């Protein structure tokens, strides 16, 4: 079916494929609603998307050159479809949520083969392994408008799997590239005696050549192991479409010193940073935080005071106050005591479910998650069109409700409800201005900020404010084991609430933690302090509009038009999932939100026998029973779902799945 010949009536039309919109689409389709899901972009996930390096460069060019084009012929086309007693509400045709995009390349611009340098073995990069890259990504988005529904959604030809395979993987099951890298790089505790090896320097040409190995997120977030998103993935069985890896450590930056934060019981008692007295003090405080509601007398005097003051009153050392405030509770100076205790409690309750930190990260980037829900929607009959948008809404003057939309092909499509991403709303349709933004930076580096025996760490780094007026910065450092960067490099995401442009907010942090060459290819003097820092090879800054403070009262729209605000500045996904459920309740108050999908062997298709999609999840027997370390099962395999530059076809939201135990390996 061509994208310009869609059915003329749907229950729900959804514009935008971000996380919130995708969850709503899956929930509606799952309970039998007819769903049309559109996006004007040529990729899925909107501001939640992941790109290859080359795809990101194209995305940057598009944002710098885009402008609103008024086409009188198109306008005349839809005006002919407006009847008596109907009004028109036009939508925004230009993306305006991203601003202040700045890119800096510090990698050598000389030909790759000429760049060979000597380095100590302790800092040498592992050789590029032949790990299977996502070669099918990127170029697939350059096609025509496509439509996918249940008869074209993958799932029907997928192999059946044994029930015993539906489990979380162990941390010992790294992708083969991780194993090979660790074998090739044996740590030497005595750096002074390390032998000298030759290695090829990473050039800009190398980054472009290996660009498909990168999966760079526009939004940097992690999944709390007991957060709403993980619970929803499990409940809905959408978890079968993705694969996750544990965040292996939490790191903090204090007075230019980077150190690991002890947060679990094993970390605390095994820490060499804390004295025995500090270990006991910390364990006592954390134990109290787990059930602080049972002891209100301990904090009631500070109920209206900041959490920071409460920590000082507990006679914790400066070391412990820093760890708890910045790296466990992760709150700011204005946070009240009870809110800080709840944040600490949530962190502690997430420990040990899948590993020794509370966090999970999806392999191939966060752009995979919206596509998982898009796939569920497609499997249950949803229709998808990329590069396809809505020009305007048709509003009934008498009822004041949206009764239809007119798409960019001039087709009038009737609907009962219209769900739209905030970026499509024009300024004149807002009753309150948006003045909050998120500052983001993406950095490609040559080594970790805190080298360890394993070069395959995924780290959450907390950076307290450098100045009283500056914001705290959250940094996520990803190794090649996360399938987001090429071997021998690290992908670093920095995020904070904006107080200025992204570069103004984040450049000082980058300069403190990384060596930023004054010209491409410049190297520091051997033995200098700068030579101990990782080198920034490529940096991108941008600001993203934060509309999470807005609600339905902030828009002048019909009552059956529901706006989904964009990503917020928090580390987790609770805000987006709560918003998705809230919108769903307004659409279908009597239906269950994302009920579990039936077992694949129970699905009977018209004219076909039972067909399966691969194993799902059983929370009780597999998730809760998972080991305390490892890769979390919500896992993909073989060929990953299209997350970097999703294709304009059903393939991008419906990839074959295999056992939850398996991980991507080279062929």
Image (spheres, rainbow, N blue to C red):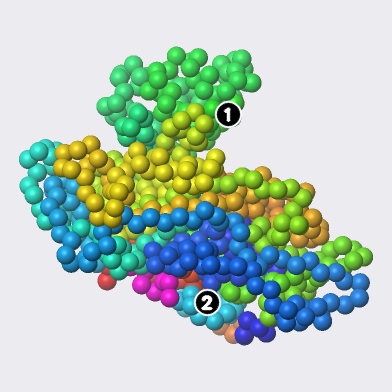
The magenta span reads 133-139
Q: In this rendering, would 157 be left or right of 376?
A: left
Q: Is residue 180 above or below residue 463?
A: below
Please state which of residues 384 and 541 is positioned toward the viewer in this rendering. Answer: 541
The image position of residue 417, as x and y in percent, is 76, 65
The image position of residue 412, as x and y in percent, is 76, 78
* Residue for badge 2: 649
Q: Does the magenta stretch include residue 601?
A: no
The image position of residue 159, as x and y in percent, is 43, 74
Q: In this rendering, would 261 be left or right of 569?
A: left
Q: Residue at x 60, y 20 (%)?
A: 305
Q: In this rendering, would 9 be left or right of 3?
A: right
Instruction: State which quadrant residue 599 falls in.
Output: bottom right
Please state which of residues 44 and 230 is positioned toward the viewer in this rendering. Answer: 44
* Residue for badge 1: 335
The image position of residue 135, as x and y in percent, is 36, 72
Q: Work out which quarter of the rendered image holds the C terminus and state it.
A: bottom left
Instruction: Using the rendered image of the protein, determine whether residue 288 is visible from the camera's viewpoint.
Output: yes
| Camera-side mark, 2 or 1 | 1
How many residues crowd around disc 2 within 10 Å: few (fewer than 14), some, or many (20 or more)?
many
Q: Work out which quarter of the rendered image holds the N terminus and state it.
A: bottom right
Q: Which residue is drawn at 71% across and 72% down?
A: 391
Helix, strand or loop at disc 1?
loop
Q: Which residue is drawn at 52% across and 75% down?
A: 648
Whichever of callouts 2 and 1 sits on the residue coming sooner in the sequence is: 1
């Amino acid at each position: 079916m061509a994208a310009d010949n869609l059915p003329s009536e749907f229950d729900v039309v959804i514009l935008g494929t971000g996380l919130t919109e995708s969850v709503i689409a899956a929930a509606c389709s799952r309970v039998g609603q007819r769903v049309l899901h559109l996006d004007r972009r040529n990729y899925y996930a909107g501001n939640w998307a992941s790109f290859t390096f080359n795809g990101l460069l194209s995305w940057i060019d598009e944002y710098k050159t885009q402008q609103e084009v008024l086409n009188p012929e198109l306008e005349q086309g839809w005006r002919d479809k407006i009847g008596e007693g109907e009004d028109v509400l036009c939508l925004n045709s230009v993306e305006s949520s991203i601003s202040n995009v700045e890119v800096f390349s510090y990698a050598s611009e000389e030909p790759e083969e000429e760049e060979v340098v000597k380095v100590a073995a302790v800092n040498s990069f592992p050789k590029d392994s032949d790990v299977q890259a996502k070669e099918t990504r990127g170029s697939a988005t350059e096609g025509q408008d496509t439509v996918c529904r249940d008869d074209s959604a993958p799932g029907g030809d997928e192999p059946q799997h044994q029930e015993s395979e539906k489990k979380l993987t162990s941390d010992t099951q790294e992708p083969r590239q991780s194993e090979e890298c660790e074998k090739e790089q044996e740590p030497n505790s005595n750096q002074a005696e390390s032998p000298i090896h030759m290695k090829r320097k990473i050039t800009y040409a190398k980054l472009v050549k290996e660009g498909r190995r990168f999966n760079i997120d526009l939004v940097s977030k992690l999944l709390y192991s007991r957060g709403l998103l993980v619970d929803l993935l499990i409940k809905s069985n959408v978890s079968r479409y993705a694969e996750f890896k544990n965040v292996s450590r939490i790191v903090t930056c204090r007075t230019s010193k980077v150190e690991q934060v002890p947060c679990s019981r094993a970390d605390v008692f095994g820490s060499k940073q804390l004295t025995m007295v500090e270990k006991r003090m910390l364990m006592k405080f954390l134990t109290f935080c787990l059930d602080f509601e049972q002891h209100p007398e301990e904090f009631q005097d500070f109920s209206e005071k900041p959490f920071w003051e409460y920590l000082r009153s507990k006679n914790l050392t400066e070391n412990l106050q820093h760890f708890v405030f910045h790296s466990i509770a992760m709150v700011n100076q204005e946070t009240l005591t009870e809110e800080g205790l709840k944040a600490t409690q949530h962190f502690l309750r997430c420990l040990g479910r899948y590993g020794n930190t509370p966090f999970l990260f999806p392999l191939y980037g966060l752009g995979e998650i919206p596509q998982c829900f898009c796939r569920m929607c497609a499997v249950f009959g949803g229709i998808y069109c990329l590069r396809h948008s809505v020009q305007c809404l048709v509003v009934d003057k008498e009822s004041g409700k949206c009764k239809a939309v007119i798409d960019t092909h001039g087709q009038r499509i009737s609907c009962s409800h219209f769900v739209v991403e905030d970026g499509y709303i024009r300024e004149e349709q807002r009753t309150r201005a948006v003045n909050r933004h998120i500052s983001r930076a993406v950095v490609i580096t040559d080594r970790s900020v805190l080298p360890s025996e394993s070069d395959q760490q995924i780290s959450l780094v907390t950076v307290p404010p450098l100045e009283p007026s500056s914001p705290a910065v959250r940094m996520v450092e990803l190794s090649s084991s996360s399938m987001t960067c090429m071997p021998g490099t690290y992908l670093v995401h920095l995020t904070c609430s904006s107080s200025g442009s992204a570069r103004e907010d984040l450049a000082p942090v980058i300069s403190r933690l990384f060596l930023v060459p004054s010209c491409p290819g410049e190297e520091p003097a051997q033995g200098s302090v700068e030579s101990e820092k990782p080198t920034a090879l490529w940096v991108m800054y941008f600001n993203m509009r934060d509309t999470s403070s807005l609600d339905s009262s902030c828009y002048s729209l019909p009552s059956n038009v529901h706006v989904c605000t964009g990503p917020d500045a928090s580390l987790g996904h609770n805000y987006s999932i709560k918003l998705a459920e809230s919108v769903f309740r307004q659409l279908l108050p009597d239906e269950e939100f994302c009920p579990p999908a039936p077992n694949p062997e129970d699905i009977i298709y018209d004219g076909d026998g039972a067909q399966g999609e691969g194993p799902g999840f059983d929370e009780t027997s597999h998730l809760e029973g998972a080991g305390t370390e490892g890769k979390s099962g919500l896992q993909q395999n073989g060929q990953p779902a299209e997350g970097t530059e999703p294709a304009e076809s059903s393939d991008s939201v419906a990839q074959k799945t295999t056992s939850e135990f398996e991980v991507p390996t080279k062929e």
